Amino acid sequence: MKSVGVLLTCPMSNYLQEQLSKRFTLFKFWQIPPNSKHEFLNQNSSSILAVVGNGIHGANSELIDSLPNLEIIASHSSGLDKIDLPRCREKGIRVTYTPDALTEEVADLAILLTLATLRRICAADRFVRTGLWKNSDFDLSNKFSGKSIGIIGLGRIGSAIAKRAEGFGCSIGYHSRTRKPHSKYTYYPSVIDLASNSQILIVACALTDETRHIVDRDVIDALGADGVVVNIGRGDHIDEPELVSALIEGRLTGAGLDVFEHEPEVPKILLGLDNVVLSPHVGTCTMETRKAMADLVVDNLEAHFSNKPLLTPVI
């Protein structure tokens, strides 16, 4: 398969790059200067048959159209919003992703962010490190056990979050495109209904045109001043200026955020708030998960170029 050119859109794990280089001719797109990318694609487009992207750097219509022999796009992510799927269907390009490989880690992080936000762990850590504990006790925080949890998106990750929250004695409600017929959790037909009946709102759905800014001012106000928002989906799921305003004005107790609307840029005002826990889009960033994701990307490419069924096909 060494004759097969694979375009890697951005830096990923050394392990993935090594595995791709062993099997294919690997092109590292981020190493090409911006003013030379067009020339690079003109020179190499005929040999590039596959693109490997992730949840941030995928394959838009411009890139797809510049690769006339492109056969497959393998996403090192469960998210597909950075891939022009209609264009892929139109051109008969196969698409794969890595859904199950990352479910458990992302669900773990959702619970971690929820606990850290409610118990103000980051603020408590600073309280100890700066010596303030010597002068006074740390302020009281909020418990997690027994709270009502609203999950937007009861897919693989949402279901894994619900299972974990049950272990804390939490009641679970959810909103999805459709009611899950075999789910024991309470279904709400709208996000506002879900927020009105929840103390903690966790965003775990896919990003689409319909779910962009699914958490807006109305949803935040329905959740209420005692509510907490946790986002392990995509930054665009939340209307970020409205979230910031709610946190500043006391219309929301706190937020745990792994993703941001314009990442890696983060609103400066969030950096100074003690009722917010921030992480740099690390939901899948464990050594074990990244290896499993890399293996799945490579296995899908090998299957395609060996004329075997894809392991995790989207198209």
Image (cartoon, rainbow, N blue to C red):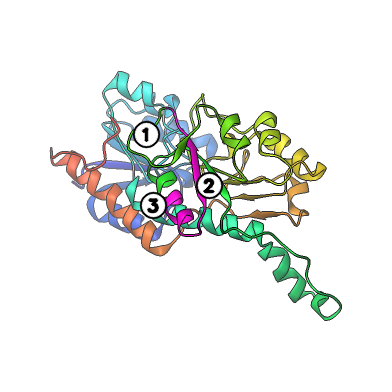
Q: Residues within 10 Å of mark 1 (few under 14, many from 20)?
A: some
Horizontal arrangement in the rendering, residue 168 relative to residue 130 (left or right): left
Magenta region, residue range: 160-177
- Circle 1 sits in a helix, a strand or a loop, which is it? loop
Answer above or below: position of 214 versus 104. above
- Circle 2 sits in a helix, a strand or a loop, which is it? loop
Q: Which residue is mark 3?
A: 102
Task: Specify which label sits upstream in the sequence, 1 or 3.
Answer: 3
Q: Could you give the CA–CA distance between mark 1 and mark 3, rounded to whole angstroms?
A: 22 Å
Q: Which residue is mark 2?
A: 232
The percent position of residue 86, horizontal first and vertical second, equals 37, 21
Give the residue at the far right of this rendering. 135
Give the residue at the far left of this rendering. 307
Q: Which residue is mark 1?
A: 180
**Of the pair 61 and 29, the residue shown nearer to us:** 61
In the image, which is nearer the foreground, mark 1 or mark 3? 1
In the image, which is nearer the foreground, mark 2 or mark 1? 1
Tell me the kind of residue under disc 3: Leu
Tell me the kind of residue under disc 1: Lys
227 inside magenta stretch: no
Q: Is residue 56 visible?
A: no
Answer above or below: position of 39 versus 52. above
Horizontal arrangement in the rendering, residue 289 relative to residue 91 (left or right): right
Q: Residues within 10 Å of mark 3 (few under 14, many from 20)?
A: many
x 59%, y 59%: residue: 115
Q: Could you give the CA–CA distance between mark 2 and mark 1, rounded to whole angstroms?
A: 21 Å
